[in-house]
Amino acid sequence: MATSKTIAEKLAAWRRYRDAVRELSQLSDRELSDIGIRRGDIEIIVRQSMTPGREDANQLN
């Protein structure tokens, strides 16, 4: 059963990632700029924000 839980957790994480990327991608360039994100950085920022233990997950250098 541990395998099915792991698969379910990974699937849920992928869905959260996909939903976050989709939501940010729907914003205009102006809206993204207002929150300090460039369109090309969306996937990187979402991936970093979902990485456990990252204290600087909301910062992109």
Image (cartoon, rainbow, N blue to C red):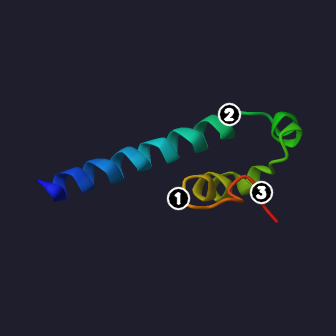
- Residue 21 in the image: above or below residue 50: above
Residue 51 place in picture, x, y as percent: 54, 59
**Would you name the residue on which mark 1 appears?**
52
Lower position in the chain sequence, tag 2 or tag 1:
2
Report which quarter residue 44 is drawn in. Answer: bottom right
Report which quarter residue 34 is drawn in. Answer: top right
Labels 2, 1: front one: 1
Query: Looking at the image, which residue sits at the far left?
Result: 1
Q: Is residue 50 left or right of residue 55?
A: left
Q: Are marks 3 and 2 in contact (CB under 8 Å)?
A: no
Q: Residue 5: which numbered mark, if any?
A: none
**Would you name the residue on which mark 3 appears?**
59
Residue 3 place in picture, x, y as percent: 17, 59
For image coordinates 62% across by 61% down, the residue present is 54
For image coordinates 80% across by 48% down, the residue present is 37
Q: Residues within 10 Å of mark 2 (few under 14, many from 20)?
A: few
Labels 1, 3: front one: 1
Q: CA distance from mark 3 to mark 2?
A: 21 Å
Three-letter amino acid code at the position of disc 3 = Gln
In the picture, the quarter occupied by the C terminus is bottom right
